[in-house]
Image (cartoon, rainbow, N blue to C red):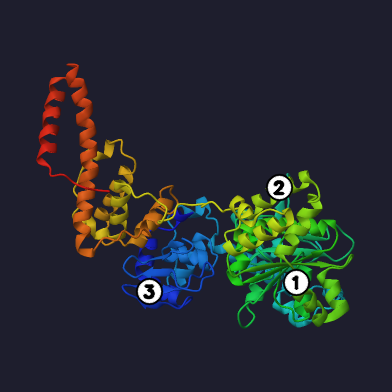
Amino acid sequence: MAGQIPRQFIDELLARTDIVELIDQRVPLKKAGRNYAACCPFHSEKSPSFTVSPDKQFYHCFGCGAHGNAISFMMEFEQLEFVEAIEELAQLHHLDVPREQGAAKARPAAHADDYTLMQQAAAFYQQQLIQHPDAQKVRQYIAKRGLSEKTVADFAIGYAPDGWDNLLKQLSPVNNRTLRDQLVELRLINRNDNGREYDFFRDRLMFPIRDKRGRVIAFGGRVLGDGTPKYLNSPESRLFHKGRELYGLFEARQQPGHLEQVLVVEGYMDVVALAEHDIRFAVACLGTATTSDHMHTLFRYTPKVVCCYDGDRAGRDAAWRALQNALPQLKDGVELNFVFLPDGEDPDTLVQKEGKDAFLQRIAAATPLNQYFFEHLIQEFDPATDAGKSALSVKAAELIKQIPSEFYRDSLSDKLANLLGKPRERTKAAVKRAPNRITPATMKITPMRRAIGLLLQYPHLVKVMPDAPELADADIPGINLLLAIQQRLQQEPGLTTAQLLEQWRDLPEHSILMTLAAWEHQIEPEQLSQEFIDTFYFIEDQYLQKQLDELALRAKLNQLSKAEWHKYNLLLQALKSKKPKLAT
């Protein structure tokens, strides 16, 4: 995906973007020596551990380990895909994102015209709700469901008329094969085995599904009669991934003030009905269970998530799946609760029966995660028996380990200990969370990592780095990466740390480079050059010594050729002439 945007443009975009200014507009920063600091936007903390370096154009949190450049920050903070982050930064600088030649043939994951077509489809459906001969019937149905014109307009609700190809004729009045292929790829139209093309949605009330930026990426359609299925969502496409998107999130974020809580419901009709009663913080999953990606997104925008499900077995099973998927996203400062509705009710019907205030009281009285966690496990494992206790202990510990928040782990561990009658220390030891990634604090800094880290953080060191082409074929872990960074800096003088990182984004080395960019080396500025040179020569000497040892062994066996004897003597002289170097 990244290759379809010219590398030169990405470098230029990073050069134009001041990461301090970018982050300060979203997270207020304070000067802290050469850098800037703030409380981390990616986890809850009381004292600042999030730093931004204007020199490196790089951010790093010493608390949770988050780090990266301006593009990484936009992806994480705004929950954007890579191309979306590039587009957002380009828009800030009033730049158009260019595409390399041939990109159209390869069809990028989010083609520029895709969103235009989706918006045109949404506008067509809205127009049909007003102008189509059946519009009166549809508007009567909407009124019967208790929706006002304002709510219909806020959610851009429309109507897909009955008929074979109404939308197809609107978007492709002439038989443009390329355009029609695109409409098929976007799942706006279908094509059968005979090549016949027809609208995907017909005679349905239409709910545009918007992404976090407000762009239409898919549709949900509700049948108006007795047809099946009652609800139909767009199939997945290059724009729409149902496991990551939430209906109503964009609309909820348009409300003034901070989004204090989000209510997760099961259908888009529930979201709209609640909005009609001025409960404008509901979202719905789209034909899937609440995923870990959903929870990650929600906790980016609000500290409190309430999952609302039917009180029957299916609803409680859905709630348990949501809880399990939420565990890896439970950081300090967030809250997850559950509401179970009376049998036969859903948010749409219930809010109309009892009104806004009564429904809000249900949300306020929601079951906390800690309580529901054990309510569910006790139904599965009987703590009154030894076998039940054993199984409960294993299952609960397995789940609790997934939680990054120490507060939640301790709280659940204490409850588990009380339930099992075990000492708290033993229970807490069983659920201790293992580190799930290498961080600068836990990473072993080898001489090679030291050299790569210093060159990455201080690209100007390339000026003092010796050329050693013979090392390119050396069997030294990491040498090719070190030499590749040197080559990039020689080809493009002036690259920053942020720009270097971007050149490896989609490659396996990117993770270790990100970690090394955040490494705190404790080397004084005036000693950087000498430290880097010493480290490089240490690596080179190790390689030469290894070659010398191999030749010396063969010399004892009289197995060296004349050329190898010559190389052996040269290596001896070279190593003797070098002063001892220290790299630890």
Determine whether label 2 and label 1 are within 8 Å by CB: no
What is the CA distance from the residue labelled 2 to the residue labelled 1?
A: 38 Å
Above or below 130: residue 425: above
Measuring 62% from the left and 72% from the top, which residue is drawn there? Answer: 302
Above or below 528: residue 570: above
Q: Position of residue 187 (x, y in %)?
A: 68, 56
Marked residue nearer the N-terminal end (2 or 1)? 2
- Closer-to-camera residue (496/381): 381
What is the CA distance from the residue labelled 3 to the residue labelled 2?
A: 60 Å
> In the displayed structure, does residue 135 sit left or right of residue 577?
right
Q: Identity of the amino acid at label 1?
A: Val
Mark 1, other Cα within 10 Å: few <14 / some 14–19 / many ≥20: many
Q: Identity of the amino acid at label 2?
A: Gly
Front disc: 3 or 2: 3
Mark 2, other Cα within 10 Å: few <14 / some 14–19 / many ≥20: few
Where disc 2 sits, the SS reads loop
- Closer-to-camera residue (566/339): 339
Where disc 1 sits, the SS reads helix
Front disc: 2 or 1: 1
- Closer-to-camera residue (45/92): 45
Where disc 3 sits, the SS reads strand
Residue denoted by label 3:
36
Front disc: 1 or 3: 3
Residue denoted by label 2:
195
Residue denoted by label 1:
271
Above or below 379: residue 364: below
